Amino acid sequence: MKRLLRVILAMVSLALRFTVAVIRSGWQTLWMILFPPRGLTPGFVEYTGEPIGRGGATLLACLVSLTPGATAVEVDPDKGWIRLHLLDLDAREHALREIRECFEPLIRVISRGGVEP
C-alpha cells in the first residue's frame, strides 16, 4: 500500500511540476519570439542521467519535448542519455538541472513502482 501511495504522489507531483514548467517555458519562449534577444544560439546538448528504463526514458523525453523551448531528438534508455535541441544554449545548465532535479527523480519512483533506489 505504501508503494502504491508513493507512485500516486509521484504522479501527482510530476503532473504539477510539468504544468508549471510548461507555463513558465511557454512565457519565456513567447518573450523570445516577440522580443528576440541578441546572440540567441539554438543548438544541441546531451543530457545524461541515471538509467530509468525504456518507459521512464520515453516519458522523460516526451515531457521535455512538450515543454516549449526544448525537444528530445534522440534517446538511449539503456545509458540514460537524451540528445536535446534547446532554443537557447545559454540556458543549458538551467534546463539540464531542471530535468535532473524536477522530473527525473519522480519518473524513477514511478518507473520502479514506488521502490526507493
Image (cartoon, helix red, strand yellow):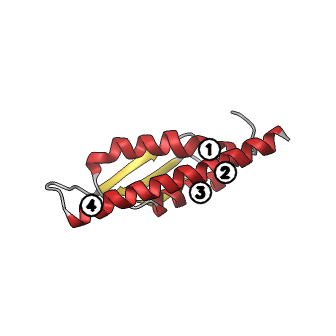
Front residue of 45 and 113: 113
Q: How far across and down, in percent of the image, does residue 4 sit?
A: 80, 45
Between marks 1 and 2, how big is the CA–CA gap? 7 Å
Between marks 3 and 1, how big is the CA–CA gap? 11 Å
Q: How far across and down, in percent of the image, does residue 11 sit?
A: 66, 51
Q: Quadrant of the N terminus?
A: top right
Left or right: residue 67 versus residue 85 is: right
* Residue wearing tag 4: 31
Q: Is residue 53 above or below residue 105?
A: below
Callout 2: helix, strand or loop? Answer: helix
Q: Nearer the viewer, mark 4 or mark 1?
A: 4
* Residue wearing tag 2: 11
* Residue wearing tag 3: 59
Q: How far across and down, in percent of the image, does residue 32 sit?
A: 25, 60
| Comes first in the chain, label 1 or label 2 | 2
Who's the residue at 36% across and 50% down the image? 45
| Comes first in the chain, label 3 or label 1 | 3
